[in-house]
Image (spheres, helix red, strand yellow):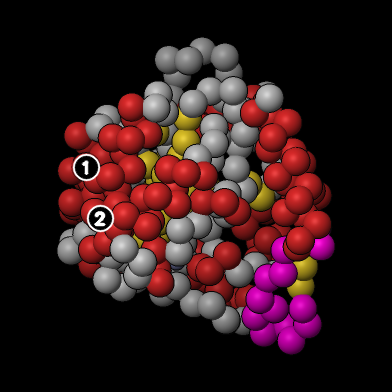
Amino acid sequence: MAVHKRWITLILSALFSGCLIMYHPMETGAAFKINRFYYEKKGEVVWDLPSERKEVAITFDDGPNPAYTNEILDTLKKYDAKATFFLVGRNVARHPAIVKREVAEGHELGNHTYTHPYRLPPSAYKKEIDATEKLIEQYQKNQVKLFRPPGGTLNKPIINYTIKKGYKILLWSWHQDPRDWMHPSASSIATHVVSHVRNGDVILLHDAGGNRQETVKAVKMILPILKKKGYKFVTVSQLMMKHERFASLFKQDPDLEPFRIFNEIR
Ligand SMILES: [Zn+2]
């Protein structure tokens, strides 16, 4: 049932968006469209990972930032929740202790470029990815490489580059962007997430890049409600590991650490 509902939503979303998602052209000047069905089927770009299991992946972008990230980590710990942090390289360089803590507490790291540019020639953009990759590898080795472009903006050179480097491009569930970057209240962020939740969602939140006080509060509201509803909070890779699209990439031993297995099989 849940899967059917998802397909209906997907089809409706596709109708409204013309089956295609428009991304910023960056320096090319030409509009670029990415075909969700094509990239999703190939497992190269991930929006969400529908499942029969009550599991969701909460993701935090733009950090780390000591004003918000530590408090979010405290809340995640309280509810035994694992999350995925899409890090901005220059913030990693500024706040290494927080990144260490993220890894030590079982969270996953993803690459969100070095300075969070929206428009940049591909050569400079690739350098941003490489610089952040080097930093992340200091903290999290041999794991699945996740890349999330700032603002969800992609172009063909960047897609090709990241895929060639072994990345999975992680966007987010269309219905799970509460737009916390527009500073809505904590309760409106929480209400959005809780009322739209479905198994396998990739939820988009931010722990840096502006005032995130309401996001910090929202996380404290979201986790107990969803936990009570029976949801587990897992990393993106953990969600991928159990999904049929990626299942063949992982061995079946549930005790093995998913990220390393992923890299070995590739
Ligand atoms: Zn961002």
Callout 2: few (<14), some (14-19), or many (20+) C-alpha neighbours within 10 Å?
A: many
Q: Quadrant of residue 214?
A: bottom left
- Amino acid type at mark 1: Thr
186 and 137: which is toward the camera: 186
**83 displayed left or right of 160:** left
**257 displayed left or right of 39:** left
Is residue 191 part of the magenta span, yes or no? no
Ligand 1 in which quarter? bottom left
Image location (x, y in percent) of residue 15: 80, 57
Mark 1 and 2 residues: CB-CB less than 8 Å, in contact?
Answer: yes
Q: Earlier in the sequence, mark 1 or mark 2?
A: 1
Image location (x, y in percent) of residue 179: 45, 64
5 and 113: which is toward the camera: 5
| In the image, residue 243 above or below residue 110 | above
The structure residue drawn at horizontal position 22% and vertical position 36%, both measured from the top left corner, is: 77
Image location (x, y in percent) of residue 227: 34, 29
- Amino acid type at mark 2: Val
Which residue is the site of mark 2? 216
